[in-house]
């Protein structure tokens, strides 16, 4: 019998050596208690009886979060996150059973890369997400601000306030922003601060010409006089986030990226090959932990991964870097 509350507490002890056994346990639980996922698995002829490895597990296309209610178990959501999108676009919905668990996961991942939140001042340039509401990214940043330095704030419109804040003290600062907003802030003035971490969350949202990630980082490094740019990878349909401190993204131990063949979605590729990005996020215990994204990526031999772009026929997504 799967114990949901026990699994929530033990998720932080998951390591590479016990990842597969935990993933198979979650697969069985979600197969029997998530009607949408069960029907999808049955169409593929998959069940706990014949799924014995990570590669055997069916990965649910994220489009199902637009057309179906993807929930494991019966409960009332504390929050419903919605993906970004233009007017008239169908938006994904991720029903969140326990908002405090989502925030706990986000904080543990963030602090594993950047240290305790109270020692950091968070500066956020996320205008599009603030405008649309119901954003998982805004919920995460709100939580970070509540636990970080009291000077943490959102910045909109008048960038002079942001420039003043950047130069106000020598404490550790993190500027997190959607790509076009980070470019906007340096259109008039180049910025430089030794204690400033610049983190892009991707997305031009139609405001600027799209760039590949390396090109974007080159421009941002020049504009901010920075040696490198950090990145955050997350999406509405996930509970966990990946961060790229220098170059490649890293998930926490309870999440993993796998690369599927572009022409055969049920075949997985070895490290160094480009393909579609599948994600196992065991923190998605209340929705679906096995997702087929529309991102293109490759995995390194260390288990880290790169996001190279998107499939041509997929929607523009605000939380991912686009090509």
Image (spheres, rainbow, N blue to C red):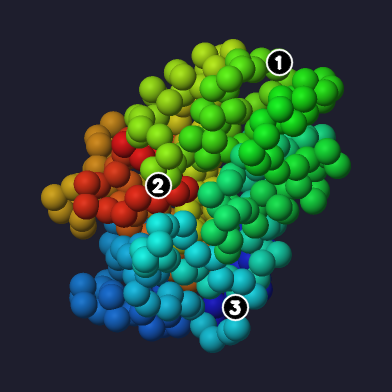
Neighbours of disc 1 within 10 Å: few (<14), some (14-19), many (20+): some
Say if 80 sits above or below 173 in the image.
below
Q: CA distance from mark 3 to mark 2?
A: 27 Å
Q: Are marks 1 and 3 in contact (CB under 8 Å)?
A: no
Which image quarter holds the C terminus? top left
Image position, residue 92 (x, y; %): 42, 66
**Circle 3 is placed at which residue position?**
77
Label number found at residue 257: 2
- Residue for point 70% across, 17% down: 193
223 or 307: which is nearer to us?
223
Count of number-bearing discs: 3
- Where disc 1 sits, the SS reads loop
71 or 182: which is nearer to us?
182
166 or 198: which is nearer to us?
166
In terms of sequence position, does the residue under pointer 1 or pointer 3 come before the other? Answer: 3
Does residue 13 show up? no
- Residue for point 65% across, 41% down: 156
Does residue 119 show up? yes
In terms of sequence position, does the residue under pointer 2 or pointer 1 come before the other? Answer: 1
- Where disc 2 sits, the SS reads strand
**Circle 1 is placed at which residue position?**
194
Image position, residue 199 (x, y; %): 58, 33
Image position, residue 128 (x, y; %): 53, 49
- Give the quarter of the image for residue 33: bottom left
Give the side of residue 256 with respect to residue 252, left or right: left
């Amino acid at each position: 019998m799967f114990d949901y509350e026990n699994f929530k507490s033990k998720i932080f002890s998951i390591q590479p050596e016990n990842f597969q056994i935990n993933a198979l346990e979650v697969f069985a639980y979600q197969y029997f208690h998530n009607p949408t996922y069960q029907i999808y698995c049955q169409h593929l002829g998959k069940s706990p009886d014949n799924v014995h490895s990570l590669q055997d597990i069916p990965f649910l296309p994220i489009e199902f979060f637009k057309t179906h209610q993807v929930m494991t178990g019966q409960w009332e959501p504390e929050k419903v996150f919605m993906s970004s999108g233009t007017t008239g676009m169908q938006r994904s919905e991720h029903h969140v059973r326990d908002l405090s668990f989502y925030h706990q996961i986000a904080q543990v991942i963030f602090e594993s890369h950047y240290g305790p939140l109270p020692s950091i001042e968070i500066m956020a340039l996320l205008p599009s997400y603030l405008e649309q509401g119901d954003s998982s990214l805004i919920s995460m940043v709100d939580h970070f601000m509540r636990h970080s330095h009291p000077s943490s704030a959102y910045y909109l419109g008048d960038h002079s306030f942001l420039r003043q804040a950047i130069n106000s003290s020598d404490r550790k600062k993190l500027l997190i922003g959607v790509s076009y907003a980070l470019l906007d802030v340096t259109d008039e003035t180049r910025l430089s601060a030794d204690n400033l971490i610049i983190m892009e969350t991707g997305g031009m949202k139609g405001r600027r010409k799209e760039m590949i990630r390396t090109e974007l980082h080159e421009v941002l490094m020049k504009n901010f006089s920075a040696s490198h740019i950090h990145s955050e990878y997350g999406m509405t349909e996930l509970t966990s986030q990946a961060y790229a401190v220098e170059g490649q993204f890293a998930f926490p131990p309870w999440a993993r990226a796998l690369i599927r063949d572009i022409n055969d979605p049920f075949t997985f590729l070895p490290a160094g090959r480009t393909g579609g990005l599948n994600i196992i996020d065991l923190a998605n215990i209340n929705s679906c932990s096995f997702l087929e994204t529309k991102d293109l990526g490759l995995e390194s031999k260390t288990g880290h991964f790169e996001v190279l772009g998107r499939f041509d026929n997929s929607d523009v997504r605000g939380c991912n870097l686009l090509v």
